[in-house]
Amino acid sequence: MATRGKNKANIEAVGGKKLTPATQMMGHGYDPFLSEGALKPPIFLTSTFAFESAAAGKRFFEHITGKRQGPADGLVYSRFNGPNQEIVEDRLALWDGADDALVFSSGMSAIATLMLALVGQNDVVVHSGPLYAATETLIARILSRFGVGFVDFPAGATREQIDDVLTRAQALADEKGGKVALVYLESPANPTNALVDVEAVRGARDAAFPGDHKPAIAIDNTFLGPLWQQPLKQGAELVVYSLTKYAGGHSDLVAGGVAGDQRLIDIIRPMRNTIGTICDPNTAWMLLRSLETLELRMSRAGENALKVCTFLRDHPKVEGLGYLGFIADPRQQDIFDRHCSGAGSTFSLFIKGGEEESFRFLDALKIAKLAVSLGGTETLASHPAAMTHLSVPDERKKALGITDNLVRISIGIEDADDLIADFAQALDAV
């Protein structure tokens, strides 16, 4: 393995054709002949790395401490960097066309580190809603302890609505003596699948902050990324992932990632170095395995979801579907057409009834597992109002459409007809 920036083994084009990320996942960022010819990267289980010279050690630490921008020229200490983590970061950046990427111990550690790096005391965060419940908790209950305020807007907000929210956010920032520090989005929203118009957000941000000091635009891209949505193309500057989900894809690891503009990654990296939220070498190695099949797994799951939702759409015990392949709202369809290349495999299923009927459906499932998370090889089902979003106040859940009859489904790569049979018998129990 060669340290980042020194690897000459990368092949980005063949015969004038630029290679796709799916192809580059097989070898990008790794030279077998620098690791005894090992075809796959070994797991580098070491806490520290030897320097070739004292001058090299000084130079590496100048990057680690932020005196020089960008990643370190060499390996220093496993809280800062490591061979497995650097290879994953190089490959993760390829999917979104990002300048650089960072990996973390979980999706929430990625989000927390990003916010700690970009948001200061008495600043204001603007965010779409709903967000993953732990993200909302981080903003509203933890950052607020340090004077951080927030203003939110619904996921499908128009440009005019976003303009108004940014105006209110600036007024709040002026009142608090801080700045509007971050625009944080989640699209599709968890668990409603509502889409955010990233292009409108970028236009509104640039209009409201015409100078050099603009709040960064970050987006949680876990539900559709990196295959079906690449928000950097629509104007986001950072994409956030729970790599536990589709990127990991086997429900056997927990990790997070951030990819995007080098200027912002260079701000987040020193915070990760300080608080130690990098993922471990073994997890990074497992992510390398998973990224090789990411396109295959996501494509199969997406095909399955379309078949399953086609069955569910007309079922008499189904009140509605939050599936991006069957969008009824013209505004949401417009965003989908401009931003997305696929409908994904995670959707919300609205059972006729309430919590009792939803629980009966969940308890009757045989193939699909009753568990939180998503994006794995197996099909999962959960009840957000009673599980992942239980901590969200009832009034806010109602406003965001997180109802007692909403069941979140993540379709896996099983046989689609088998899944349809399972959902059919479970609905019979309602």
Image (cartoon, grey):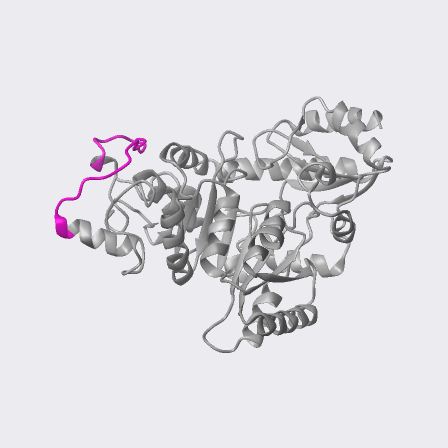
Q: Is residue 249 visible?
A: yes
Is the N terminus in the top left, top right, bottom left or bottom right quadrant? top left
Q: Is residue 19 visible?
A: no
Please name the residue shown 17% across and 44% down the image: 51
Percent x, y of residue 130: 67, 52
Question: Hey, which quadrant is residue 184 in on the image?
Answer: bottom right
Q: Main secondary structure of the magenta part?
A: loop
Q: Nearer the viewer, residue 233 or 133?
A: 133
Please name the residue shown 66% across and 39% down the image: 388
Is the C terminus in the top left, top right, bottom left or bottom right quadrant? top right
Q: Nearer the viewer, residue 220 or 427?
A: 220
Using the image, determine if residue 167 lies above or below residue 274.
Answer: below
Q: Is residue 40 magenta?
A: yes
Using the image, determine if residue 211 lies above or below residue 419.
Answer: below
Using the image, determine if residue 249 lies above or below residue 321.
Answer: above
Give the magenta-colored segment's residue range. 34-55
Please name the residue shown 78% across and 51% down the image: 395
Percent x, y of residue 424: 79, 27
Percent x, y of residue 419: 69, 28
Q: Nearer the viewer, residue 123 or 337?
A: 123
